Amino acid sequence: MQCDEAQALISASIDGEASDVSVGELRQHMAACPACAGVQSDFRRLSQQLKSAGREILPARVETRVRQALAQAEAEQRRALVRGKPWIRQLAAMAAVCLIAVFGTWTMTRYMDSESRIEQDVLSAHVRSLLQDSPIQVASGDPHSVKPWFNGRVEFAPEVKDPAAEGFPLAGARLDYIDGRRVAALVYKRRLHTVDVFVWPSAHAGDAAARLIPVKGYNLLTWTRNGLTYWAVSDLNGAELQQLQALL
């Protein structure tokens, strides 16, 4: 086996995509060729970095560095094509894949971390309100009284409805604090249950379908509509919480 053939097989052998015969020939070549053995060692190191890349939450400034490194990897890959050295081309490609994986994992991790923080904030705000003498700052079942109360208190106009006829009377509203921002909190009743519906401007365009999240004996329901994000939370069962969502 020649060096070019061996180096072309390194990546496939690490990924388990090479045949047993090819792996055996590659092993024999590596034992007799220190140069190719060094290339294989570099590939294994990059492969290990790739597998562990997503275990740390990277700072926001890494995006610029990742994009620069990707551009450098692409330039190196093009130069390798001109020089005709397949192992350099494979190293550049593998480095690019590694960097893409780091960036993708970092983005997803940040998103999931933000969602978890919001879930915790919503649940904590609901439980905290239940421990107070009254979870309401403006006590009224009239949407025409509740909606104007938010003027000057939040920088948006929450939609306020009173589905009392369907068994979810509006009890009032208050201000609360979720994910580092002031939000509107609408308070509804369902028999002996209290339902808090937190509302704030959405960070993303378009609507999002409702998503039910059971957490520690409570149900959280979140959706996005008309530029506003909604989070409803209660110990009410999920089906009734979804019924309220359809009425708002």
Image (cartoon, rainbow, N blue to C red):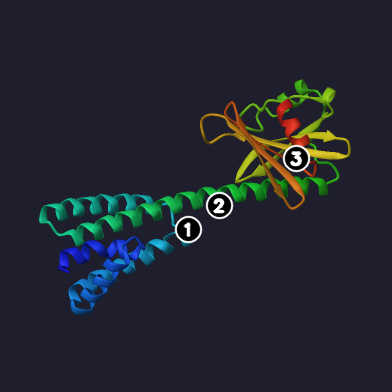
Badge 2: how crowded within 10 Å, few (<14), some, or many (20+)? few
In the image, 164 versus 130, the foreground residue is 164
Mark 1 — residue?
Answer: 57
Residue 108 on image: x %, y %: 48, 49
User: Would you place residue 175 above or below residue 26 in this image?
Assistant: above
Marks 1 and 3, how far apart at CA = 33 Å
Kindly tell me whether residue 147 is visible in this rendering. yes
Quarter in which the C terminus is drawn: top right
Question: Residue 154 at what x, y percent from top left?
Answer: 64, 33
Q: Nearer the viewer, residue 183 or 111?
A: 111
Residue 113, numbered label: 2
Q: N-terminal of the two: label 1 or label 3?
A: 1
The type of residue carrying mark 3 is Gly
Please report whichever mark, 2 or 1, sits nearer to the chain's N-terminal start. 1
Q: Are marks 2 and 1 in contact (CB under 8 Å)?
A: yes
Which residue of the protein is positioned furthest toward the left in this rendering? 83
Looking at marks 3 and 2 on the same chain, the residue that comes earlier in the sequence is marked by: 2
The residue carrying mark 3 is 238
Q: How many marks?
A: 3
Kindly identify the amino acid type of the residue bearing the numbered disc 1.
Ile
